Image (spheres, grey):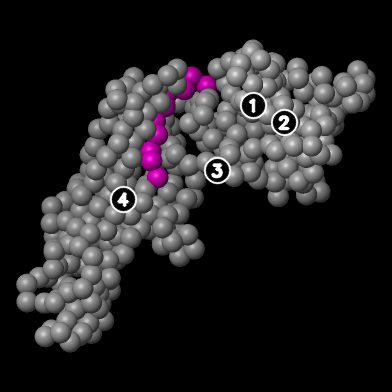
């Protein structure tokens, strides 16, 4: 992501802009009012941007910090001292080790920085493989950029002394089923992205997408019958979560969906192999059709029959499967509850 893209994105999203799970940015501004003998004589502004990018297959998170300066009328802004700081206020698990690098500078004046063609600095974070948790060696950190300013003597200044833009948490993994596993894994930013499906004419997955749309918008018209059906995956607060490591549970999800297809459309629902039983949520999610089975829900907390199954043409179903598989891989979606995703049907 370029600085220009970041600035344009922040015009719409204000606090942070997300281009992808591998390119994000955030920003903050320090607006100051300058006075002499209680009379306002000028204003100044510092825009502090943090642009984070991750190269494909890399474990290094590169953060480029940019400054933008503006003044009006009379100020003492050129003599202001700007001191950037970065911190990792929380990292988990406790075993996680994250190295930092780059060219984090000491305090510099506005005048010195403004004379540069692209004022700012770079900072890098690299999560050490083997220090994460679970089978996927996952580790996370909260990254907090901060800019502190010191105003010159002799002026009355009203304005903040620091700026802390929000920044999405980086995450590292070495999942065996994701790209880069044979090397050293990879990194991404922790954000619930949406898997795209389309119902437009000509879309290869059109009927799979229509099934998802119906499951969300007309749940009581889908099979199995459940007047309280409320499938997750539409909002970040109720995402879907990937199921990879438990192959038996994936099979159980699939089998429960097929039972529903047979119960409604009979054993010949496939019409000689022309159709397949499409299930939503997908069998590759923890929210799949088997979630309420006693084996997976011993406390009986999961909603019953909270899924949809229907026969759709084989080509549509397989096209939807390719979208799902590509999405998982492209976005480094991990198994488990810490990496939820959403569904978007256009």
Q: Rounded to the nearest whole Å, what is the CA distance between mark 1 and mark 3?
A: 19 Å
- Which numbered circle lies on residue 31? none
In x, y percent, where is residue 244?
Answer: 57, 21
Q: Quadrant of residue 241?
A: top right
Give the spatial CA distance, label 2 vs label 3: 18 Å
Q: Which mark lies nearer to you, 1 or 4?
A: 1
Judge whether 258 appears above or below 145 on screen. Answer: above
Structural crowding at the residue carrying mark 1, measured as other residues with C-alpha within 10 Å and reported as few (<14), some (14–19) or many (≥20): some
State the residue at coordinates (15%, 84%): 38
Please indicate whether residue 21 sits to the left or right of residue 320 in the image. left
**Marks 1 and 3, the one that precedes in the sequence:** 3
Nearer the observer: mark 4 or 2; the answer is 2
Residue on which disc 1 sits:
302
Badges 1 and 2: C-beta atoms under 8 Å apart?
yes
Number of numbered discs present? 4
| Residue under the image location 40 percent in, 52 percent down | 25
Q: Residues within 10 Å of mark 3 (few under 14, many from 20)?
A: some
Residue at which label 3 appears? 236
Magenta highlight range = 168-177
- Which secondary structure, mark 3? loop
| Above or below, comparing residue 232 to residue 165 in the picture | above
174 drawn magenta: yes
Cβ–Cβ under 8 Å for marks 1 and 4: no
Choose the circle earlier in sequence order: 1 or 4: 4
């Amino acid at each position: 992501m370029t600085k220009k893209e970041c600035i344009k994105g922040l015009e719409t999203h204000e606090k942070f802009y997300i281009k992808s799970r591998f390119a994000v940015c955030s920003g903050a501004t320090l607006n100051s009012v300058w006075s002499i003998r209680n009379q306002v004589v000028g204003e100044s502004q510092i825009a502090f941007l943090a642009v984070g990018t991750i190269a494909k297959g890399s474990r290094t998170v590169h953060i480029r910090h940019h400054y933008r300066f503006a003044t009006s009328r009379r100020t003492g802004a050129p003599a202001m001292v700007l001191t950037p700081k970065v911190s990792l206020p929380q990292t988990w698990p406790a075993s996680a080790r994250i190295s930092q690098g780059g060219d984090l500078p000491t305090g510099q004046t506005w005048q010195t920085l403004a004379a540069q063609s692209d004022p700012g600095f770079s900072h890098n974070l690299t999560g050490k493989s083997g220090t994460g948790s679970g089978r996927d060696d996952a580790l996370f950190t909260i990254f907090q950029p901060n800019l502190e300013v010191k105003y010159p003597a002799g002026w009355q200044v009203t304005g903040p002394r620091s700026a802390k833009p929000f920044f999405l948490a980086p995450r590292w993994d070495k999942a065996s089923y994701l790209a880069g596993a044979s090397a050293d894994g990879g990194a991404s930013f922790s954000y619930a992205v949406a898997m795209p499906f389309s119902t437009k004419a000509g879309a290869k997955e059109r009927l799979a997408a229509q099934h998802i749309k119906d499951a969300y918008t007309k749940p009581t018209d889908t099979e199995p019958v459940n007047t309280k059906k409320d499938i997750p995956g539409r909002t970040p607060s109720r995402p879907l979560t990937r199921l990879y490591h438990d192959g038996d549970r994936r099979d159980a999800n699939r089998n429960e969906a097929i039972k529903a297809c047979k119960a409604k459309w009979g054993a010949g629902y496939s019409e000689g192999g022309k159709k397949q039983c499409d299930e939503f949520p997908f069998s590759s999610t923890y929210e799949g059709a088997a979630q309420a089975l006693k084996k997976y829900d011993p406390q009986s907390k999961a909603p019953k029959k909270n899924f949809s199954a229907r026969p759709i043409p084989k080509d549509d179903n397989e096209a939807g499967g390719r979208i799902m598989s590509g999405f998982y891989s492209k976005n480094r979606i991990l198994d488990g509850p810490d990496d939820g995703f959403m569904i978007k049907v256009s």
